[in-house]
Image (cartoon, grey):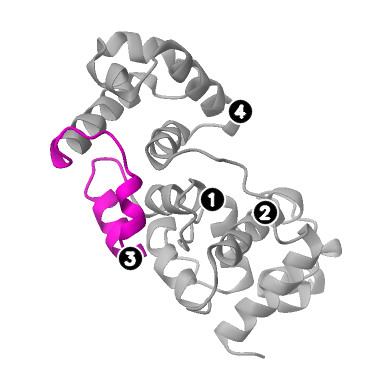
Amino acid sequence: MPDLQQKALLIHDRLCAEYGCPIPYFHDLDPLSELVSSLLSHRTRNADSGRAFKQLVKQFPTWEAVRDAPTQEVEWAIAACTWAEQKAPRIQQVLRLIGERRDGDLSLDFLAEFSVPEARAWLESLPGVGPKTSAAVLSFSRLRLPALPVDSHHHRVAIRLGLIPANVAVGPAHALLEAQLPKEWTAQQIYDNHESLMLHGQKCCYYKNPACDRCVVLDLCPFGRSRVDS
């Protein structure tokens, strides 16, 4: 059996072949817009958080306008997402804090000058921003930095493959899974790793009744082999 890093790379190569790497980026937002989009996506289906984001930017011409609006108007604008009553004041709080820390400049473009650990630490000092959100902002936005997001699909697949222990939560999983990838990898390769594992969770390694019989990494998967052999 290969060591953990070798195994992670074998899995990456097979899933990339299966899902067609390099995988196109699905967003082309500036990093502040990506942060707001990510905050809206917490515990929300992508279609619903996408509708909430579009309505928010349609209703308010700038992020300053969102920050300064009556909170209930922001809540109405993002009503398509779950917990809009919590997310509206949180988004306004985050926008205020960014402005205060940046002398009124509501932009996160400056993060391009930081290392990935520095940029993640800066973002995670904001309320409601954890490892998944900070990585999403750096990876998915126009910054295109090599940070690895881990969503619920990615997390489930990684546990079943034995890349991380079953008792590791999504947050701590980021550092463990990122450490298995070569330090010289580009942002596109890191993004491909996340997307291919996520897509595998969506298209094959389902939460219920995973399709182990057509899994391209079955021989590397303790969970799948135990199901097939039983």
CA gap, disc 1 to disc 3? 26 Å
The residue carrying pointer 1 sits among few (fewer than 14), some (14 to 19) or many (20 or more) residues within 10 Å by Cα, namely few
- Classify 63 as above or below 170: above
CA gap, disc 3 to disc 4? 32 Å
Q: Pick whichever, 135 or 116, lies toward us.
A: 116
Q: In the image, is residue 104 part of the stretch drawn in magenta?
A: yes
Number of the label disc, if any, that sits on residue 47 = 4
Tell me if I can see residue 161 in this picture.
Answer: yes
Q: Pick whichever, 56 or 49, lies toward us.
A: 56
CA gap, disc 2 to disc 1? 9 Å
Circle 1: residue type = Ser
Front disc: 3 or 4 = 3
Q: Are marks 2 and 1 in contact (CB under 8 Å)?
A: yes
Could you say where residue 5 lies in the image, as x and y percent from the top left?
56, 83
Circle 2: residue type = Gly
Could you say where residue 169 lies in the image, as x and y percent from the top left?
42, 59
Circle 3: residue type = Ser
What span is colored magenta in the figure? 100-129
